Amino acid sequence: MELKLIANGADTGGGCASSGCGSPGDRLAHLPEPIRARVNNHPCFSEDAHHHYARMHVAVAPACNIQCHYCNRKYDCSNESRPGVVSELLTPDQAVRKVLAVAAAIPQMTVLGIAGPGDPLANPERTLETFRQLAAKAPDIRLCVSTNGLALPGMVDALCRHNIEHVTITINCVDPDVGVKIYPWIFWNNRRVTGRKASEILIEQQQKGLEQLVARGVLVKVNSVLIPGVNDSHLHAVSRVVKAKGAFLHNVMPLIAEPEHGTVYGLMGQRGPTSEELNAIQDACAGDMVMMRHCRQCRADAVGMLGEDRGEEFRLDKIADREIDYAAAMARRAEVQAAIEANRAAQRGQTGEAFVPVASLTRRRSGGSASRSVLMAVATTGGGVIDQHFGHAREFLVFEASPSDVRYVGCRKVDLYCAGGDTCGEAESALAKTIQALEGCEAVLCSRIGFEPWGALEAAGISPNGEHAMEPIESAIAEVYREMMETETWHSRSSRVA
Ligand code: CLF
Ligand code: SF4
């Protein structure tokens, strides 16, 4: 069996291995060219793209037309954001100004999304005006929107007229009996509708909107909030239904419910899922649907790569005096993005070389006995390479290596271990939390690591590894996995001989 390097999410699609097209490391190769072109630089619709490209959101949509039990209107929409955060609300003009400023400063920012702080389609004028201006002024930026779906069917024409090619619908259920436990009411035809009827209408609108978008060739991602005991056993059915209707990608996100957020779930003590529960549901749904596993539940005014938030740098007061020559910026953006693509192609070449021999080496040298899977965590700032100091990581990407593949399985957020200055007193507890967050991982790959965390990780049974700095992530993991399996095989043979 050859070792395939597989990323989850849209990149695995309909089975690259069987299509035989493209280089082994080219994970979008199975997609038809027009679709491939649309996801190649969208950091949410392609797991691989999120290592290289950034997105930004503008918070132009304050109102919402439904109530979810995991939402408190003081904060951003939790259907596409981490709960408990508040964004800087902008007018469409202010939003456009901000987008141009960010696009000029961050040339790898390829996608502008509107995801709140309420529901973008419950604020149609503000949302569409922002899109209209951007389509005219910044035609090189992809436009993306996220919605609860209630107003979607009436908006599909308008979205298509504004060149929106990527839409996210949050669908937590396809059964109103599950819906009543999530949605207390919706605002529909100028009145409030409650109970089962509210969920019936919402579900019908979501499904109708999904069908209409797919019929128009729009790529639809479905978000589902995993609520243990409420919709966990139901999400498989959601996946089946939305896949059958042509959704491109399914993103199962964990419920985050804390009493201090003031939400119904937070106050009633509804718990969120553990990472094991989340992974199990994602795996169960993956049989029916291509899964997104790299979501960071970003804020309604997020700016930057998915794992980072540079929003503070671009607050209105900070960009007020900035003169932006967007024609010049666009030329520079094209240059930088071409360099990124050249870099990706080069990485695919390197990955391709590591791709074939690893499994065969493992098999040949171990006599075929290496068969278990290993979780490994990686510190990276993006670019698809291992380039971050262990102590500077705010998150670790977790991959599962097995004899058949290396696949991305999720992201673990951590407190900054090494903040510099006078924070060393806090470092110890941050390190302990980081080690806890890495539970289940057997190795951590980073560019560098200090003596103290090295010892603490080893004591916790996690091997620190700084030998693959600046190497492509997946080929480095394949190499570490091969070494681990060889060592295990050697030990087991030695003990048999002894
Ligand atoms: Fe924004 Fe959403 Fe578009 Fe991406 S986010 S509107 S599809 S551009 Fe992405 Fe952020 Fe997850 Fe959303 S990581 S919360 S999936
Ligand atoms: Fe809150 Fe979003 Fe639900 Fe509206 S759709 S209630 S903003 S989580």
Image (cartoon, rainbow, N blue to C red):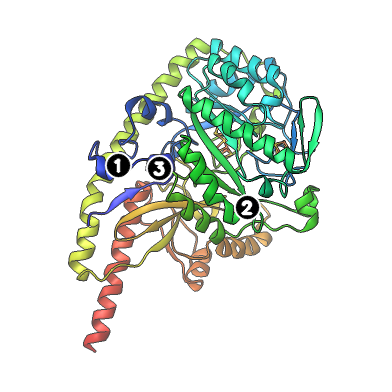
Q: Which mark is residue 231?
A: 2
Q: CA distance from mark 3 to mark 2?
A: 34 Å
Q: Quadrant of ligand 2?
A: top right
Looking at the image, do the residues carrying marks 3 and 2 touch, with CB atoms under 8 Å apart? no
Position of residue 465 relative to residue 314, above or below, is: below
Pick the residue in front: 165 or 76: 165
Residue 321 rendering spot, x and y as whole percentages: 68, 16
Q: Residue furthest bottom?
A: 498
Looking at the image, do the residues carrying marks 1 and 2 touch, with CB atoms under 8 Å apart? no
Q: CA distance from mark 1 to mark 3?
A: 20 Å
Pick the residue in front: 59 or 196: 196
Residue 388 showing in the rendered view? yes
Indicate the quadrant containing the N terminus: top left, top right, bottom left or bottom right.
bottom left
Q: Which mark is residue 384?
A: 3
Q: Is residue 32 left or right of residue 220?
A: left
The residue under label 3 is which amino acid type?
Gly
Q: What residue is pinned by disc 1?
A: 16
Nearer-N-terminus badge (1/3): 1
